[in-house]
Structure formats: structure tokens, C-alpha cells
Amino acid sequence: MNKINIRPYKKEDRPFLRTLCCDVADRGGPIDNSFPDREVAADMLTKYYTDYEPESSFVAESNGRLVGYINGCMDNRRYGLVMVWILMPALLARAFKRGLFFKPQVHQLIGGALRNWRRAFTWRKKSFHSHQGHLHIGIAQDFRGQKVGRGLINALAGHAVGLGITELGASVHGGNKAACVFFEAQGFVVRDRYPMVMVINGKEDHYHSLLYVKTISAL
């Protein structure tokens, strides 16, 4: 068993966290399977946490290597406002400059997003006006099953309780069975299920996005 150290995120962890996120972002596998630009993907998935709320992130390291992370947000409403009014306009501009809107993969993602607009509206209504928290977690494939995720969840939960947060949520692809088992083992339960559509290689993939929630007020 490798020795794991769980500690608060530091600014110098940023490039390693972004790389690891892209390595595990597609249902535990590389983001390259579904999105053609790692820099834009990393901005979209991690920039709020590392640049606007770094105090709510923790990392796991082993022998100097970053092998896991948990990015937390303690105020969903603030997250939504920053994403919509600050980060998304910059992301769209960067994506355009890098030619992403001319790539077939992106066309398919946009098509899927348009079909999922009802889910996005419902999520916005419930999340943007909530002052509860959420998380995003990633663990290197060769360090799964070593209680790294449990340690990261506990670190974030302790931080959240200290700020008066009573719930943490996580969005999980319904087809990611390993992630579902993990969250349920950590005491999360499914609160909502949203039907989703993703287009991959011209074929529709119908699935559910699961909102897992853990009550932490009793910790």
C-alpha cells in the first residue's frame, strides 16, 4: 500500500491538478475520448476552483506525485454566477481562437447540449440559488481502491462543516458504475436523476446524470 498524504491545495499544484483532471474526466478515463482540447477542458472543469476558491480544494500525494484531488465549492450560487458571467465568456472566446468550433467532436457536444437544455434549466434553478456546496473529485487510475477518495472526501467535509455547510453534492454519469459505488460507500444518496443525451461518433448515448448528496451537518 502506497503512503498517501492528504493536504490543502497549493498554487503550485495547479498544472498537475489540471493534467490529472483531464486524465480522469470522462467517466474515469481521459477527456480526449470526448473533447479535443485539454487546455480548454481544464479551464472549464477546474478554473473556478483553483482560481476563485482554492481554499476549498485538497490534494493527495504519494512520493511527491499528485495522485488525487477534490475541488470543492461552498456556495453553489456564487459558482453559477462566476461561471456564467466571468468564466464562460472567456472560455468561448478561447475555444473560438483555438478553432474548436470547427471540430466535429465539438459540433456533437453542442448538439447534445441543445437537447439537454431542459436539464440545464432545472439544474440552474436548483443550484444557482442554493448556498449549499458541491464537489468534483479525481483519482489516478493506479491509486484507486487505496482509500484516497475517502481521505479527500473527509478533508473537504471537515472544511465545509467549519463553514456551516450542511450538504455536499456531486454530479455523476449514471453509466459510471464505479463512481456510483464509491459515492454510495461514502454515504451519498441519489437525490435527483436527469435524463441526458450525448452524441459520440454520430450515435446518441442516452443516460442519466445523477445528483448525489451527502448530509454533513452531523459530522
Image: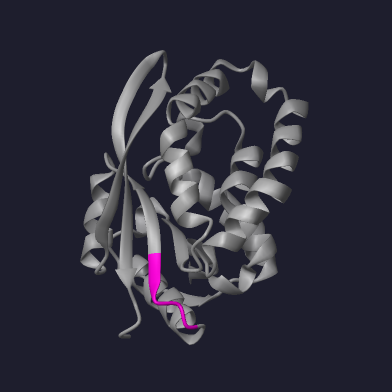
- The residue that appears at 69% across and 66% down in the rendered structure is 12
In the rendered structure, the answer to whether residue 85 lies left or right of residue 184 reads right
| Residue lying furthest top | 202
Point out the image quarter for the C terminus.
bottom left
Residues drawn in magenta: 164-168
Query: Where 20 falls versus 100 (above or below)?
Result: below
Q: Is residue 167 magenta?
A: yes
> x, y (%) of residue 25?
46, 44
Quadrant of res 144: bottom left
- Which of the pair 214/81 is nearer the observer? 81
Residue 63 visible? The answer is no
Between 170 and 137, the residue placed more toward the observer is 170
- Corner quadrant of residue 150: bottom left
Closest to the observer, 211 or 153: 211
Query: How many numbered markers are drawn?
Result: 0
State yes or no: residue 67 in magenta: no
Measuring 55% from the left and 18% from the top, which residue is drawn there?
107
Where residue 54 appears, as percent x and y from the top left, is 63, 69
Q: Is residue 66 above or below residue 173?
A: below
Is there any visible trace of residue 159 in the rendered image?
Answer: yes
Q: Measuring 44% from the left and 54% from the top, which residue is drawn there?
A: 126
Give percent across and percent down for residue 201.
Answer: 42, 16
Q: Position of residue 37 (x, y in %)?
A: 62, 32
When asked about the image quadrant of residue 137, the answer is bottom left
- As drawn, 6 above or below 181: below
User: Magenta region, mostly helix, strand or loop?
Assistant: loop
The N terminus - image quarter:
bottom left
Q: How is the image coloured?
A: one colour
